[in-house]
Amino acid sequence: MSEKYIVTGGAGFIGVNFIYSLLKKDSATQILNIDKLTYAGNPNSLTFASQHQGYRFLKADIIDEKLIFNALDEFKPTKIVHFAAESHVDRSIDGPDAFVRTNIMGTYNLLKLAFRYFDALTGSQKDRFRFLHVSTDEVFGSLGKQGFFTEDSRYAPNSPYSASKAASDHLTRAWHKTYGFPLLTTNCSNNYGPYQFPEKLIPVILLNALEGKPVPIYGDGSNIRDWLYVEDHCEAIQTVINKGKTGETYNIGGANEMSNLRLAETLLTLLDEIRPKKKGSYLDLISFVKDRPGHDMRYAISIDKIKKELGWQPKESFLSGIKKTIHWYLEHEGWVKGILSGEYKIGRLGLGEALKNVLKR
């Protein structure tokens, strides 16, 4: 019997790739994609899914009780994978309201209604049901020069974004401990790959370079992140929801730790080889800009638990993954133009000026 997935936020970067991975593995899988279609939700990324008879789309806000309750009642999922979230740190600094509303209140509403749906199930239907909450390693704060985040790391979020995700993590844990709801949580490192909205670091570097514009690097570029190819992440999520123990948290990382400056240099050097400039090197475009307030210095994540208990590990190195990513963006210029021709423009956010202006009113 094929699974019936509700995927929230399935028009966003990771959600799109997850839906693609589900349909590639089993074309008979039934999927209800629930997405509000904010600025980062792109229905044009889902043209492949519309070819599948079992795929449905519902435009809805996860905070809308009536729509979500009706969706659960009518679709009757066996699995729920919860991606829906405001996710850009810089935007959270300028406007934290949306992050509190969606990431905390939206998750609460989804948990409340999903539990009511689950509680009414019986027998094998109840045994089969799972809810997976997708979170981030940013809830753990900033690491020193040594060590790794583990599933037991202390929560210490430093941005409105990470604080809102930390709150949602605590809610999901409480729903399992208090109500016995069959929950799993994953905390991932920085994702990259196809369909990523061009406000995140890697597409900003790539697209600015192709336009001959300065490539902005915050501070001195020494901040370190672990990079996870999105297809590896999607495979890990499927592994956790199918094999993971309910109530448990699993860290998902790419084992690709590097500074932002080294990342930019690697990407731009590859771009010099794949699509050379007429004159000079893309490396000449690197420009250091004012750092983000409260910028965490280092993230690094241990995958020992998911590797030992569930047998998952990433397939892509950063070099192989970033080559695939560069080629995807070069081959999908129409997708990029479709975004940049609208209201969204690549630009600097996250200096806190918007919030200051609100507080002055």
Image: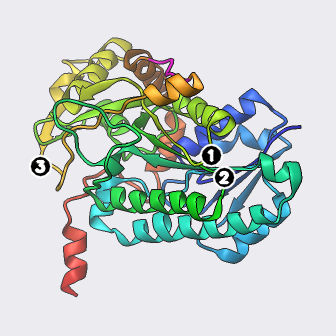
Q: Amino acid under label 3? A: Lys
Answer with the quarter of the image where residue 210 lies.
Answer: top left
Of 243 and 33, nearer the camera is: 243
**Gap in angstroms between the C-alphas marked 2 and 3:** 44 Å
Mark sitting on residue 246: 1
Kind of element beneath mark 1: loop
In this image, 108 relative to 25: left or right? left
- Tell me the magenta residue range: 312-316
| x then y, percent, for residue 221 | 16, 35
Of callouts 1 and 2, the N-terminal one: 2
Q: Amino acid under label 1? A: Thr
Q: Main secondary structure of the magenta part?
A: loop
The residue that disc 3 covers is 290
In front: label 2 or label 3: 2
Q: Does the segment drawn in magenta span residue 115?
A: no
- Residue 307 visible, this angle: yes
In this image, 211 relative to 252: left or right? left
In this image, 336 relative to 51: left or right? left
Of 139 and 223, nearer the camera is: 139
Mark sitting on residue 182: 2
Q: Does the segment drawn in magenta span residue 315?
A: yes
Of callouts 2 and 3, the N-terminal one: 2
At a point 67% along the width and 40% down the height, the residue shown is 19
| x then y, percent, for residue 154 | 31, 49
Pointers 1 and 2 in contact (C-beta within 8 Å): yes
Quadrant of the drawing holding the N terminus: top right
Of callouts 3 and 1, the N-terminal one: 1
Q: Amino acid under label 2? A: Pro
At a point 58% along the width and 54% down the height, the residue shown is 9
| x then y, percent, for residue 219 | 12, 42
